[in-house]
Image: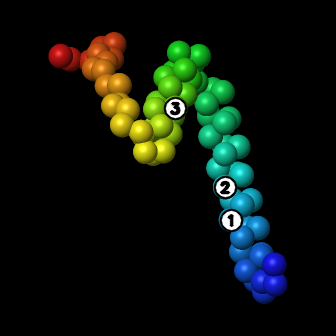
Amino acid sequence: MDADAFVMRNITDQIEAFQGVIGRMNARMEELPAEIQAEVEEASRVLRKVRAGGRTLLPLSVVQRPGAQA
């Protein structure tokens, strides 16, 4: 690529920033209980399918949190 150095530096900085975000997100996921991790992973799978152009409906459910008033 015959790109100027500042263009390559900018792209490299963006890649490093995204890698940092990914690392922090993975660390936060590991802190979550296994049940919540599974829910997040399933939601991610569904969203990827929807974004890919599928007509998959999002699985929605109502969750009553402990101590929450109805």
**CA neighbours of label 1 inside 10 A, class few (<14), some (14 to 19), many (20+):** few
Q: SS class of the residue under badge 1?
A: helix
Q: Nearer the viewer, residue 49 or 25?
A: 49
Q: Quadrant of residue 37?
A: top right
Give the residue at mark 3: 45
The tag earlier along the polypeptide, 3 or 1, is 1
Q: Disc 3 residue type?
A: Arg
Q: SS class of the residue under badge 2?
A: helix
In the picture, the quarter occupied by the C terminus is top left
| Residue 9, image x, y percentages | 77, 75
**Position of 50 relative to 45 (above/below):** below
- Nearest-to-viewer mark from 2 and 3: 3
Task: Report if the CB atoms under discs 2 and 1 are less than 8 Å apart.
Answer: yes
* Spatial separation of the CA atoms under disc 2 and disc 3: 20 Å
* Spatial separation of the CA atoms under disc 3 and disc 1: 25 Å
| Residue 21, image x, y percentages | 65, 50
Give the residue at mark 2: 18
Give the residue at mark 1: 14
Q: Disc 2 residue type?
A: Phe
The residue drawn where x is 78% and y is 86% is 4
Position of residue 59 in the picture relative to residue 29 (left or right): left
**Position of 4 relative to 22 (above/below):** below
Q: Nearer the viewer, residue 32 or 61?
A: 61
- Nearest-to-viewer mark from 3 and 1: 3
In the picture, the quarter occupied by the N terminus is bottom right
Q: Nearer the viewer, residue 67 or 48?
A: 48
Q: Quadrant of residue 24?
A: top right
Q: Disc 1 residue type?
A: Gln
The residue drawn where x is 74% and y is 59% is 16
* Spatial separation of the CA atoms under disc 2 and disc 1: 6 Å
**Position of 43 relative to 53 (above/below):** above
